[in-house]
Image: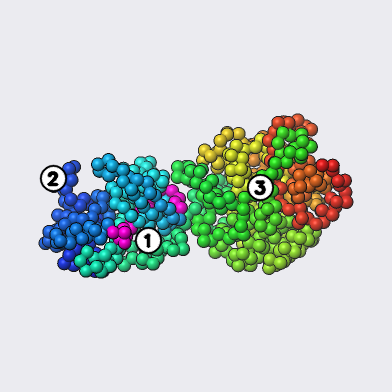
């Protein structure tokens, strides 16, 4: 291959075209965008054409055998003698010829896909057509594609991408005007983003294999570099001369993937906007919430695209904060089942009761959702040491995900934490610190002893990402109910991250237009009388819960005497028309035994409180008999050995 360097032009002169190959039989040139190859019926009289300019530059007569649209830049070939023209045309049409383009397309494209939709030619006849696509990168609402043509129909790439709903950015004929206008106005889009970067074929005379490469032009490279979230390495590689064909082959998938539409973090203290992509804990002592560009997501990601993905936590990637999936820390967070419980529904006096069984997640609890996101984001942001207080499953979940990520982990827990929770933390290699007190005191130990030494606090709502993982409970529930949410959700509530996250999920789904009914569920925060600060605050009309000294309950996961996000829980409960309710501590074993005997579901003691709350609502008339109710089982009963022994002793076996 002969790569002929740019030649300087005299002042005021038209710069010479850049030649990529030249021999006595053919020439290959880098065609600028906006330059037509030859005169057409709509051409202006004084318009310049590539055929004319290149012929004058070489002092040769050219035989056109290959074409590019006016708006497309990239490699174009001409024969320099008549006898080579036909042979060159045949070489370019041969199955061994490779014609590849770089295209920036709307939305989130699959890693690899093909379009074989027939297209009409200039005479209106339908002709076979095939284009294969590979995704090089995903970022900021778009995908950078490598497109390979197997046929040569007019506007083939543009028409095929339009058919797949991933139109070329800047395509004024087949694209989306609103999207193009946004990129022009906000980011200075210079033209249609389509560039013919590679052409490989057998030389028509010598038979030598020619493999020509044309780097991304300056105008497209500068536009690309200015877009948010584009790694500099990507642009540098695309501008390199010569291009690195091995890197562009991408045999191991996309180099840069943007799954998230995060715009900023929002302070719940005063609404301040904090930048995403930086390490944050709280703002003015209050939690931070992740915010997304929901308008763009609604315009670019159809609900059907999410439904077509594997049924796991990560299918909702656009509504999660992780920017690069290579930073994902996962233990296989599958979709959890939504189980109909007709006998339990009859016992409680409601038309339909379903239990979403979170015990199927890694580690046996819903804590896997929050820790999967928190540790993944910590990994993305360069954290290597994490710490958390726990009275139940959170410590084991963090220890597992930290081990998966190769991070150091410290877990501070009360001395009466269930033995299974303590042992799993130790076996996952984390440091265990026992404290004779309650979880909020353990949290103070984390902040005072470890944060000053550079450890990152993953306590409930003291970083912004556990709530995004818990949010997927609501997103998943929407999918499983056909986007028609239940009448009421009863949720065991300690720190409240799950309830806040689900209420956030429903708001986001509503903004996206993905819900098939306007109604949102009534949210019921369920606690035990042994630790019920949220219930007391709700009953007294308070915006936040006062400290509750002497808290005690065998349901260790909801033994939280003072929750950082209590005001957010109370706000969600009131906005939904729900309530905060407490079940008698002494009744928890009975409800656990009833669920296990009637439905075979190993309900954890925290979720047993939900069944008592349903019974109370029915007795008070605040829950209709025809209600469709969902209860979340947040953990596996088998992790509560001490409580199971208590339940077995106290509860008489219910008759099925």
Q: CA distance from mark 1 to mark 2?
A: 38 Å
Q: Position of residue 134 (x, y in %)?
A: 41, 56
Q: Which mark is residue 235?
A: 1
Q: CA distance from mark 3 to mark 1?
A: 44 Å
Q: Is residue 49 magenta?
A: no
Q: CA distance from mark 3 to mark 2?
A: 70 Å
Q: Which mark is residue 341?
A: none
- In the image, which is nearer the foreground, mark 3 or mark 1? 3
Q: Residue at x 56, y 38 (%)?
A: 515
Give the magenta-colored segment's residue range.
94-110
Q: Is residue 222 visible?
A: no
Q: Nearer the viewer, residue 356 or 542?
A: 356
Q: Residue at x 37, y 46 (%)?
A: 117
| Disc 3: which residue | 337
- In the image, which is nearer the foreground, mark 1 or mark 2? 2
The part of the image, by quadrant, that contains residue 330 is bottom right
Q: Which mark is residue 45?
A: 2
Q: Quadrant of the C terminus?
A: top right
Q: Nearer the viewer, residue 268 or 137?
A: 137
- In the image, which is nearer the foreground, mark 3 or mark 2? 3
Tag 2, which secondary structure?
loop
Circle nearer the N terminus (3, 1): 1
Q: Quick check: 103 left or right of 326?
A: left
């Amino acid at each position: 291959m002969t790569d002929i360097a740019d030649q300087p032009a005299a002042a005021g002169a038209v710069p010479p075209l850049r030649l990529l190959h030249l021999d006595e039989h053919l020439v290959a040139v880098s065609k600028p965008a906006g330059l037509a190859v030859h005169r057409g019926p709509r051409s202006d009289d004084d318009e310049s054409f590539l055929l004319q300019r290149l012929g004058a530059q070489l002092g040769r007569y050219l035989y056109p055998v290959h074409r590019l649209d006016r708006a497309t830049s990239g490699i174009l070939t001409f024969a320099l003698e008549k006898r080579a023209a036909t042979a060159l045309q045949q070489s370019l049409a041969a199955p061994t010829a490779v014609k590849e383009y770089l295209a920036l397309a709307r939305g989130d494209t699959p890693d690899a896909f093909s379009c074989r939709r027939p297209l009409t030619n200039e005479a209106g006849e339908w002709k076979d057509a095939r284009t294969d696509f590979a995704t090089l990168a995903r970022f900021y609402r778009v995908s950078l594609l490598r497109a390979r043509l197997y046929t040569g129909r007019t506007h083939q790439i543009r028409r095929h991408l339009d058919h797949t709903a991933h139109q070329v950015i800047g395509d004024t004929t087949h694209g989306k005007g609103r999207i193009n206008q946004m990129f022009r106005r906000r980011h200075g889009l210079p033209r249609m983003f389509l560039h013919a970067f590679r052409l490989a074929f057998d030389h028509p005379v010598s038979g030598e294999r020619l493999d020509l490469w044309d780097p991304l032009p300056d105008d497209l490279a500068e536009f690309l570099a200015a877009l948010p979230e584009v790694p500099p390495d990507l642009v540098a590689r695309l501008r390199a001369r010569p291009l690195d064909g091995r890197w562009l082959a991408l045999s191991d998938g996309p180099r840069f993937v943007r799954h998230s539409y995060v715009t900023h973090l929002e302070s719940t203290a005063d609404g301040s906007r904090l930048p995403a992509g930086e390490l944050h804990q709280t703002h003015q002592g209050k939690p931070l919430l992740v915010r997304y560009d929901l308008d763009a997501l609604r315009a670019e990601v159809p609900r059907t695209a999410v439904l077509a993905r594997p049924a796991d936590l990560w299918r909702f990637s656009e509504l999660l904060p992780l920017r690069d999936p290579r930073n994902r820390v996962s233990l296989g967070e599958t979709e959890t089942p939504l189980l109909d419980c007709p006998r339990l529904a009859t016992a409680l006096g409601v038309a339909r009761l379903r239990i979403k069984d979170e015990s199927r997640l890694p580690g046996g609890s819903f804590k896997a959702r929050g820790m999967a996101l928190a540790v993944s984001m910590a990994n993305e942001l360069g954290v290597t040491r994490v710490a958390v207080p726990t009275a139940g499953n959170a410590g084991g979940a963090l220890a597992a995900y930290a081990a998966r990520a190769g991070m150091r982990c410290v877990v501070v827990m009360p001395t009466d934490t269930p033995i299974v929770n303590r042992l799993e933390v130790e076996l996952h290699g984390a440091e265990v610190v026992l404290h004779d007190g309650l979880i909020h005191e353990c949290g103070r130990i984390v902040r005072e002893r470890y944060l000053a030494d550079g450890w990152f606090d993953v306590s409930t709502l003291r970083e912004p990402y556990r709530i995004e993982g818990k949010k997927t409970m609501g997103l998943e529930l929407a999918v499983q109910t056909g986007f028609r949410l239940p009448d009421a959700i009863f949720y065991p509530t300690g720190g409240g991250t799950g309830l806040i996250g689900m209420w956030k999920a429903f708001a986001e789904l509503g903004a996206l237009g993905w819900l098939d009914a306007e109604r949102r569920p009534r949210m019921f925060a369920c606690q035990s009388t042994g630790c019920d600060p949220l219930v007391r605050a709700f009953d007294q009309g308070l915006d936040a819960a006062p400290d509750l000294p002497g808290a005690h309950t065998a349901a260790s996961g909801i033994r939280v005497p003072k929750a950082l996000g209590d005001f957010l829980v109370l706000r969600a409960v009131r906005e939904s028309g729900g309530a905060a309710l407490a079940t008698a501590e002494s009744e928890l074993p009975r409800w656990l035994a009833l669920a296990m005997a009637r439905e075979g579901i190993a309900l954890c003691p925290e979720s047993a409180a939900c069944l008592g709350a349903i019974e109370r609502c029915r007795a008070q008339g605040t829950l209709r008999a025809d209600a469709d109710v969902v209860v979340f089982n947040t953990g596996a009963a088998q992790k509560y050995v001490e409580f199971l022994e208590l339940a077995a002793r106290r509860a008489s076996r219910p008759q099925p």
